[in-house]
Image (cartoon, rainbow, N blue to C red):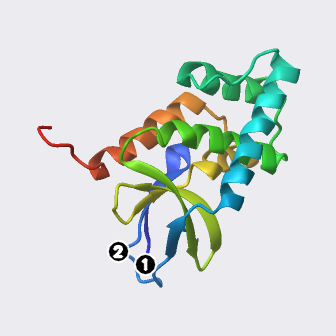
Amino acid sequence: MGKMIPNIALGLALICTAAAAQPDPEVQALTQQDHKFMRSQRQRIDDLARSGLGRQLNGSRENDLGILQQLLDKKLVRADKTLELQAMGVVLGDFLAQDPSAKWVTYRDQRGRSRALQIGNSDYFLFPVTMISRRAEVGAEVDVDAIFEKANTLMQPYRQRLPFQ
């Protein structure tokens, strides 16, 4: 069951599966096919950055999120390019997944199958793949750093506490 805790201002939602009156979602580890697809999505963004900006993804949050912002600002990825926008969400999600409490999973509910970040072993999930695309597709201004910061803040209460914290 999933309860969505929305943040309308940034188009973010944290879903708690234990709180709503919907059937339990199916949550599983990513398959090899998921890993392959996500690698191709990352490569898609790196290729766009190299050809359009003369830059490349390097794993640094400042660099890579800056590249995502530039791709949007320079209209190298337009609002009608859902695959590219969602590829940007994979890159964004990778930085959120660096938190030791977050892991990529597949999440299947009545709406379909998605790649999501599960926060710890909880029933809380973020869907970074669509965080950029949903805003861009409706013509809203996209601030990649603000989306990252808000998602990171949403995760905070559900993170696993390490001993002595």
Residue located 60% across and 47% down the image: 131
Q: Mark 1: give few (<14), some (14-19) or many (20+) Cα within 10 Å.
A: some
Location of the C terminus by quadrant is top left
In this rendering, the count of numbered labels is 2
Location of the N terminus by quadrant is bottom left
Asked if residue 22 is positioned above or below residue 5 in the image, the reply reads below
> Can the viewer see residue 139 in this picture?
no
Return the mark for residue 1: 1
Q: Residue furthest left?
A: 164
**Kind of residue sitting beneath label 2:** Ala
State the image quarter where residue 48 is shown. Answer: top right
Residue located 55% across and 68% down the image: 107
State the image quarter where residue 141 is shown. Answer: top right
Asked if residue 27 is positioned above or below residue 145 in the image, the reply reads below
Q: Earlier in the sequence, mark 2 or mark 1?
A: 1
Residue located 64% across and 22% down the image: 58
Q: Residue furthest front?
A: 32
Return the mark for residue 71: none
Q: Which residue bears the numbered disc 2?
A: 19
In the foreground, 99 or 29: 29
Give the left or right position of residue 64, taking residue 54 as reference. Answer: left
